[in-house]
Image (cartoon, helix red, strand yellow):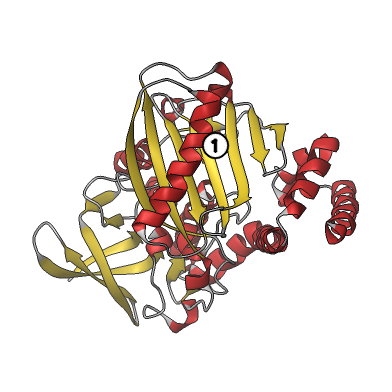
Amino acid sequence: METTEFLVVGCGPAGGTAAREAARRGIATVVLERDTVVGAKRVCAAGLRPGFCEDFDVPRSIVHLDPGTITLTTVEKTYAFPVGPAHTTTREELDGTIADLARGEGADIRTGMLFRGLERERDGVVVEYADARAGVRKRIKARSVFLAQGSSARLDDVDARFRHAGWNAGLITCFQYRVYLARPATAETYGTLEMHYYVSPLSGRNVIAWMFPKRDHLSIGLGIQAKMPGAALRAETDALLATVERRLFPGIPYTVRDEGNLLYGGLPRASIGADGVMVGGTAAGLVDATTGEGIHEAATTGRLAAEAAGDARARGTDPAPAYERAVKRAFYRRLRHRHHLMSFLERRPPRFDVLFRQLEETPRFAELLQSDRNAFSAWERMYLYVQAAKFSLRALRA
């Protein structure tokens, strides 16, 4: 049976970053990616936090635009805030570039490989997978494994400790149009990230929608926390497209490429590390429920997995416990708060306006909410608690 030190399943931002940083540490690394082209089937608005390229040593060439404003739109009003600026890209370029960088460090990335399961042995973890190119089943043993399959991860049968009762309830059906215009849209289109929060007049369901500008197209899509027939989902997206078209590119001819998949927007998994196996990125449930953002969290888990694997090799220990502690310390508190906040807002949609109005009135509040919670000073935490109390009192009256 083939052996390696570190095995990664999935080559998105989590898996690609893990492979690159592990290989850079001199760890023999193999990646099993299900798609034949890395990143080609990822449906994602692909917005990146300010400084992402510098933080993860990714070339700026992947960035399409640097919007300096985000707008949050409800049925009542549109609210605007400065953001950094943020960056836009596509998952083909982001994931593909990180994979190429990982190969450059010596990682062995294999595409068309379908993960089928794993079993633990005394001296490692054995993964079974299907080689779709060769049409055969194969097995490979690794000292440690990093599972980063995104929202398609089905871990209930992999390890009982990774089971998450709320996983299916947290899945969001996403559909997106890539809109290719015959000539440019209005100027403000290319300097703004748009997020929309509303109750659909077609289905009566809560919707999170977006318009993100790219180098050669606009990403216009939405997510609904329910499984929907394709025709109904397309009707929802067509209605969104019509409203965006009237504002940003009226009368301009365009063509559309559509794409859809599932995203996760619930609580993080309770357990993400056990006996040599680590779970990262969206597979771990690390997605901000209020915005759908998860790329930064995913890449960070990849980095933490590589660090844990390297430290464990030097000490002859299991990397999973240290990895789990580091990830939970970095993200769990914030993501749980965001999930609870989103649930609170969606129960009574007018509460969105209460929150967004407060953010608009108090720019410091908006700025801090975009920051990493671990970087807050004691004074900033107190300020946030005061603002949260104000919001709660106003929202309960909404």
Res. 80 image quadrant: top right
In the rendered image, the residue lying farthest to the front is 201
At x 66%, y 40%, the residue is 73
In the rendering, at what x and y percent does residue 55 appear?
A: 55, 38
In the rendering, at what x and y percent does residue 121 appear?
A: 32, 81
At x 32%, y 55%, the residue is 29
Looking at the image, which is closer to me, 12 or 291?
Answer: 291
Point out the image quarter for the C terminus.
bottom right
In the rendering, at what x and y percent does residue 58 appear?
A: 45, 34
Q: Which residue carries the number 1 mark?
A: 52
Res. 334 image quadrant: bottom right
Looking at the image, which is closer to me, 61 or 39?
Answer: 39
Residue 52 drawn above or below residue 135: above
The answer to whether one can see residue 22 in this image is: no
At x 38%, y 63%, the residue is 152
Q: As shown in the figure, which amino acid type bears the numbered disc 1? A: Phe
Looking at the image, which is closer to me, 281 or 8?
Answer: 281
Q: Secondary structure at mark 1?
A: helix
In the rendering, at what x and y percent does residue 103 appear?
A: 29, 42
At x 85%, y 36%, the residue is 361
